[in-house]
Amino acid sequence: MLDPFRTASVAHAQGPHSAGTAAYDLIDPDAFSAARQEITTWAGYAPTPLVELEALAAQVSVARVSYKHEGPRFGLGSFKALGGAYAVLKVLHREVMKQEGPSVSMADVASGAYAHIAAKTMVISATDGNHGRSVSWGAQRFGMPCRIYIHAEVSEERAEAMRALGANVIRIDGDYDDSVALTRKEGEENGWFIVSDTSWPGYTETPSEVMAGYGVMTHEINEALEHAPTHVFLQGGVGGLAASVTAALKQHWGAECPRVVVVEPELAPCLLMSANAGKATVAEIEEETLMAGLSCGEPSKLAWSILAEEASDFLTIPESVVGPAVRLMARPFGGDQPLEAGESGIAGLAGFICAALQEDIRDKIGLTETSHVLLIGSEGVTDQSLFDRLMAAA
Ligand SMILES: Cc1ncc(COP(=O)(O)O)c(C=O)c1O
């Protein structure tokens, strides 16, 4: 069961470890706590499980593996439910305050008291699935019109999930980065509100609110653990997930913060390339990875500023380990709990198993028999037919 990970071709780069305080400044503790206060009041909120994978830990010779399973998050299937929907509410709150004065509370806006303003506040976003689902859900919840741009390869099942939440879904030619560029253009031309999970120069407020929303997940992890893990493996698309988790871990554990390892598909290695170049760097996507949520060629500048200081290691994994990792979660070793995980959700896990089993990477990353590894299972099954195909390929 572990052979595909033992033989997979894995690239490694050291983090640049630039000096600075980005983990405290770019999403500050107050921003994390404000997001938590709001999101935990939403109907359907419940912490997701932190699952101990004891048999897997024994198989790959580490002391402990803790896996945060985001499949059940708000019924939307991924951690992204926390970010986009919260940022939509923040946009609406600002718009209401602009029209009605600064004393309007977020709670009043969330309760629908300003429905007439909400109905005229168009939010738009680009997505490869999960972020758009969160934005659509937030817009529906707060009574706002919503347009979502998807690229050619996003599955129809994912598009349908957004339409079911009331979004006008527009499919474009090109890839994820093209859909981001079109969103920027249409937003600026029409005065619509862009709710993006990636940032660019001059556009950081909303992406940092998206990342503050993800902090609910990290807070739940911190609350559930008595001691800091030694390592965390975080999958990277534009880097927002990795940077948010890193900042929240650092703020909580300080000097005990786990060693941060970022994992990307080898077909979309923009963060590893940034680590090698010492600055945010664009990767050309020539072929789409199965890990759709991670198929990003351009890092979020905001996220990169945190990862450049805090991430120790960057890995890429090949497509060949995706199916084996999904199947390993569904049909695990020993008494480990079977979990249904999507193909982007298992990237950190797949990178970790490769690293643990390949001596040179294991040494570089400092994994030992006493390591406690934290993994973020960032999605459950968000594309059923792809999941079924991966399961059937065993
Ligand atoms: C399930 C899942 N995991 C991880 C990521 C990566 O997040 P980010 O693009 O913020 O790096 C995504 C992005 O869409 C995702 O959908």
Image: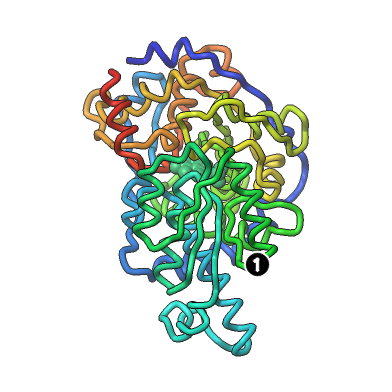
Q: Label 1: which residue?
A: 190
As drawn, 89 above or below 202 = below
As drawn, 304 above or below 333 = below
Between 30 and 254, the residue placed more toward the observer is: 30
The residue lying at 60 percent from left, 83 percent from top is 97
**Label 1 CB sits under 8 Å from any ligand 1 atom:** no
**Left or right: residue 102 compared with residue 67:** right
Image quadrant in which the N terminus is located: top left
As drawn, 368 above or below 285 = above
Q: How is the image coloured?
A: rainbow
Where's residue 23, x and y in %? 66, 51
**Left or right: residue 297 compared with residue 34:** right
Identify the secondary structure beneath mark 1: helix
As drawn, 37 above or below 309 = below
Q: Residue 281 sits in which quadrant?
A: top right
Where's residue 37, x and y in %? 47, 69
The residue lying at 46 percent from left, 70 percent from top is 38
Where's residue 283, x and y in %? 67, 31
- Kindly give the residue lying farthest to the left in the view shown: 335
Quick check: can you spot residue 268?
A: yes
Quick check: can you spot residue 257?
A: no
The residue lying at 71 percent from left, 52 percent from top is 200
Mark 1 closeness class: few <14, some 14–19, many ≥20 residues within 10 Å: few
Q: How many marks?
A: 1
> Hey, what amino acid is under mark 1?
Asn
Where's residue 86, x and y in %? 49, 64
Q: Residue 315 sits in which quadrant?
A: top right
Between 33 and 204, the residue placed more toward the observer is: 204
Image quadrant in which the C terminus is located: top left
